Amino acid sequence: MPETDDRLPPPEWLDEKLVAQALRRAEQDEELEVEALDVGYACGRGVNFLSEMLRVTASVKRGAGEARTQRRSLLAKCLLRAGPLRRVVQESGIFLRETLVYTVTLPAAEAALQAAEGDRWKPLAARCYHSGSRPTDFLLLEDLAEAGFAMSPRGRLLDRQHCSLVLETVARLHAASVLLADHEALPAESFSQNPMFTKYGSDHFSVVTDRLYSALADVLGTIAGCEKYALMYRDTKSTVFDKLQGVFDSCRPQLRVLAHGDLWKNNIMFRYVDDRPVDVRLVDFQNCYWSSPAADLQHFLGSSASLEVHQQHVDGLVSEYHAVLQGTLRALGLHRQADAYPLHQLRLDMDHFAAHALCMASMMPPMILAPESLGKDAEEAVNNSQGDDTFFRQIVSNPQFISRIKYVLPAYEKVGAM
């Protein structure tokens, strides 16, 4: 761990015994031994807000007679141990939600997809080796970096190639989740609401939204032609969460899928060949909930797609997503569900969630485009509801963000998002 990192040291319970137990079970090798362990933070500051991500590097032997030691890398995702967001995470139950997804939903979904897709099948997410229970909530996951995956370069939004890969994978996840709607381990009430709108989630994040909208109103108010949008942000900053909750509560989806719920750039990893993305894995399933597919699409496109994508490729990407969704539903034998969800219905549903896209387009790109040096400032701004707004004013003044928000605002206005 870098000497300048002032975060908490790794938890004491994350030790050789726990990692050996997980690997023995996952690899069905009772003789496996972990001889040494190194644990450090897997993410830089300002990348992950609702949990702690630790990289666990283990020296592994395959039995007493084995001379060679192997290096294995895993990720431990742990419940926050400090800060105001700890209570938000605990009270909203998002860690239990994610544990169910990793231990029940994803294995079942991937088994169904593998049977239907054959040689074309690719995993949706990292493999889960082990999960804990309170008070030490954690997930021990495959380290995707060891398998050649990485986050896309920091400080950039996603181009068409990246977006196309993401939406293909999301379409497959959505289609497979339809099979699991009545699974006994996934009670509807546990996933019925976006965790952002639980009491503790809205209490905290509405403050962050208010402060960022205030900063954005100040900046747009200085730009010719944007004065009415500055007024819109100033007028809606204290009511945006109520409006968004109304959007989600009034949704009556023609196709009900398990939405990822937090589909933005930092929750996606890619494998590259010659700097070109060729494969993708989704991470961070804490916010999963039953909803329309359009909720995920608007969250992703609003938060993470580049200006060029919004200018030239959104319609094509939505059509591509729908084609994969339809093909996967039919491959899984879900012909009735496919017939009941034509492309024009998806587009209508996306209009319904346009206000959500606007919120994501206002809040997430400034975070994505912020330089790495502001990572600690991002953590403090999100965690400290009493701080000043210097950080928010700084990130919404980014010229790349201003160009993008100026382009997308009229489009969201046209469909009634404001």
Image (tube, rainbow, N blue to C red):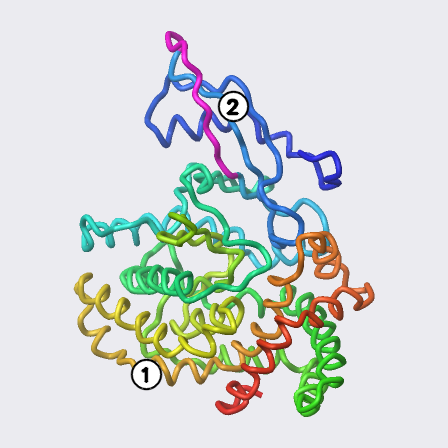
Q: Residue at x 36, y 60 (%)?
A: 165
The region drawn magenta spans 64-75
Type of residue at label 1? Gln
Q: Residue at x 20, y 77 (%)?
A: 339
Label 1 CA crowd tier, 10 Å (few <14, some 14–19, many 20+): some
| Residue 260 versus residue 68 in the image, above or below | below
Q: Position of residue 57 (x, y in %)?
A: 52, 29
Q: Residue at x 66, y 82 (%)?
A: 239
Q: Nearer the viewer, residue 132 or 244?
A: 244
Question: On the image, numbered disc 2 is attached to which residue?
Answer: 17
Residue 325 found in image quarter:
bottom left
In this orientation, does residue 182 appear?
A: no
Type of residue at label 2? Lys
Q: Residue at x 53, y 51 (%)?
A: 95
Q: Position of residue 288 (x, y in %)?
A: 46, 61
Q: Position of residue 233 (x, y in %)?
A: 68, 83
